[in-house]
Amino acid sequence: MSCHVMHILASTCMRFASRLRARTSSMTRFTASSTSTSNSRRRQQRRWRRHQSSRSFLMATSTYRYAAALLVIALVLSFPPSSATSAAATKNDATEPEAIDPPKPNGDPRCPCLSAQQLEPTSVILSERKDGSHNKGFDYNATIGSLMDPTSYGVGCRPHDAQTATCRNGPSSSGGDGDGNGEDGSSSDCETTVPRPSNCDQEEWCSRSFCYVDPDECDLLHRPSLYYRHRYYSYATCGFMDYWTASKRVESLRGDTLRVAYNSNTGGWKGATNVDGSFAINNMWRGPIVEFMNNAAFRGGFTLNVTAPPPWLRDGSQRFFGSSSFDYCVYAASLGYVDLCVAAYSITDKRAAVTTFFETSDDPIYLITFTDSGDSTSWSSFTEEFGKIFAPFTGAAWAMIVLLSLPLLGLLMMYHEYGSPGSAYPRTAPYLVTNEDGTEMIRNRNVPKIKHIGRSLYMAALSFFQESYDQSVVTMSGKIHLLAISSLVYLVLAVYTANLAAILTSDNLSSPVDSIEAAVLAGFNICSERKVMEMVLNRYDLDESLIVPDPISLGGDGKPGFTCSNCKSRTRVFDMMRRTHSDRWMYCNAAFALREDLEALNGKGLHCDKIRVGDAVAHDSTGIPIYDGIADGLTALLHDMKNDGLLNKEYGFSMPAVQCAETGGGGSSFTVK
C-alpha cells in the first residue's frame, strides 16, 4: 500500500511539472507572434525571451525539487517500524507493568505508612477470611516470589506487586496457575475467554502503590492482608484505588459453598415459587431470581446449598420485625445463619439497616379498581353513550368534512357535468304541455341552477352515508373528480370506523375513579398488603381507617394491611375486592398493589375485571438479602451479571402472557390543527 501511495505522489508531481512547462512555452509563443518587426521591438523581444526562459527554468527546477522532496517523504513512510522492536516492546509492557509514581511516598498523614522497624514480625501464612476460613492453596513462591524481600515488601508507597511472581508472569504466562493458552505464553485468554479470567485484571493493581499501615492510626480506607496475619494494607493513603481487592472479591467465592434459603413469594412473578412453600428443601424452585442465582453460582464457581433458617430464630425475628416469613429469612441472613435469601424481598428501611441487599428491580405500585360495568340505564347514561357516535372526530374535523369538503366536492361535480349531454345537470329539461284543444306536446325549458346546486349538495352528503357516489358521470373531468370524491369518502369512513371501535373497546376498561382523591371522595375503602400500605401512606396524607384490616378470622392480626404469615397476602388484596359491599372490615372497593401482582393474575386469566388507574402512586424496591461476610464478593459478581443484561433476560423469559379476553385498546379522536 505504501508503494502505491509513493507511485501516486510521483505521478502527480510529474504531471504538474509538464503542465507548467507547456503553459510557459505557450506564453512565449504568443508573445513572439505579437511583437513588431522593428529593430527596437525585436531587441526588446529578445530580452523578454531570455527573461522568460530563465523564469521557466527556475520554475521547472523548483517543481522538480518539490517532486523529489515528496518522493523522499513517501519512501520514508513506506517502511514500517521493525516488527521485532514492536514485539519486544509489547512483551516488555505485558510482563513488566509501568509503575505509577505515588503522590505521597510515605502515605497521607491521616494514615501514615509503617516503616520496616514498625512492622511486626509475622509468619508467611494467609490471614483468616471474614468467615473464619483460610486460603489453603496459597503458595508464597508462586504469588510473592522467592526474590522478594519480605522485610521491605509493603514499606512505603511503592508498587510492591510490580516485581512479584504473579505480576511478572502476567495473565498470559504459561506458568503459575496455568491460565496461558500457548506453549511460549505469548497469547492470552483475556480477549478470547468468556467469562474473562480473574487474573486478567491484575494489570490494574500491579502498577499501583500501597503500603502497610496501623489500623488504629489510619482514618482512610484500609483492609487486612490476605497473605500476612495481623497486617493491614492501604492503597488510599498512597492516592490509588484498591483494584487488588476488587479483582479478588469474586475470586474469593470460587470453590465455596453458600447456604441459601428460598422464600415462596405470595404474589407476582418476579421472585421465587415452590409448590411446597417457603424454605422447602428440594429442587422444585422456579422463578427468574432462582435462575439468575443458578447462573451466578456457575459463573462464580461456587455451589448453593439449599437450607432453612434455624427454627429457634423465629421468636427473635417476630420481636424485631414481625410475623412475616420474609422478615424471618432477612433476620437469619443478617446474623449469618444463612448466606443469602432468594426471593423478591421489599427493601424496607428496617431491613436495609441490618444487612446488605442486592437490588433486583424497582416495581411501581398502582391504585387498582374495577372496570366500568356499563350497566346503567339512566337518561344521562343514554345521552353519554349516544354521544360516542361522534367521538371518532373532533368538532373541527366534523365541520371540515360536513361543511367544507363534501359540499365543495359536490359543487365541483356540478361544475364539471353542467350542460353535458346525458349528465345529471342539464341546462334544459323536457316537459309535457297540454294545449287548449286537448293536444299534448313536449317542450324544453331551462332548469334553475339553484335546483342543480341543491341536488349536488344532497348527492355529496348521501355519498358519505351510502359509502359511494351513486350518480352517473359522463365527462372526463367529472370522472376524474369522481375518484377524488370516492377517495375522500373511503378514507373518512375507514378512519371513523377504526376510531369508533377503539373508543368503544377502550371504554370497557375505564374506571369510575381516576385517582386516590377521587376514590376517597367516592367513599371507597382500600385493600393493601401492609408493606405496600406503609409506602403509600408515607407519600399521601391518608387515614389508616381507609385500609381494610387483616381479618383475624382468616389468620390476620386485625391491623390495617394484609400480612398474614400463612396466607398469600398479595393475592388476598384482589380476592377481597367487591364492587359494592356492606362490610368495610372485610371487603374493599379498590386496592393498592404492585403491577406485577396484577400481571401474574391476568396471566392465569384471573381478576380480568380489574384495572390500574392513573400513574404509579409509589415504588417498591426489591432485592436479595446477603450476609455481610460474603456481601462484597457476591454483590460484585451479581452487579457484573446484571450489567451484562442477564437479570433482564430472565425477567423476559418469565413474564406471563395475559390470558384475559381482548377488551382493551387505545383510541383518540381525529383532530384538525
Image (spheres, grey):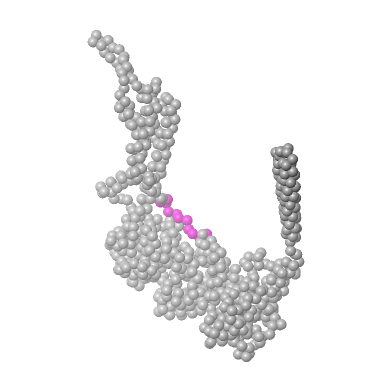
Residue 386 rendering spot, x and y as whole percentages: 30, 44
Is 149 left or right of 303, judged from the image as shown? right
Is 217 left or right of 522, judged from the image as shown? right
User: Considering the image in quadrants, where does the N terminus appear?
Assistant: bottom right
Q: Nearest the camera: 555 or 401?
A: 401
Report the number of discs.
Answer: 0
User: Which residue is most to the left?
Assistant: 436
Q: Residue at the location (23% across, 10% down)?
A: 436
Q: Residue at the location (25% across, 11% down)?
A: 435
Quarter residue 580 falls in: bottom left
Quarter residue 37 falls in: top right
- Residue 44 position (above or below residue 172): above
Question: What residue range appears in magenta?
Answer: 653-664
Q: Nearest the camera: 101 or 242?
A: 101
Q: Residue at the location (73% across, 38% down)?
A: 38
Residue 520 rendering spot, x and y as whole percentages: 30, 62
- Residue 17 position (above or below residue 241): above
Residue 471 in view, yes or no: no
Q: Main secondary structure of the magenta part?
A: loop
Is 371 left or right of 117, judged from the image as shown? left
Q: Nearest the camera: 668 or 326?
A: 668
Magenta segment includes 659: yes
Residue 587 rendering spot, x and y as whole percentages: 32, 63
Residue 79 in view, yes or no: yes
Q: Residue at the location (38% across, 46% down)?
A: 673
Magenta segment includes 315: no
Residue 171 rendering spot, x and y as whole percentages: 67, 71
Q: Nearest the camera: 304 or 215?
A: 215
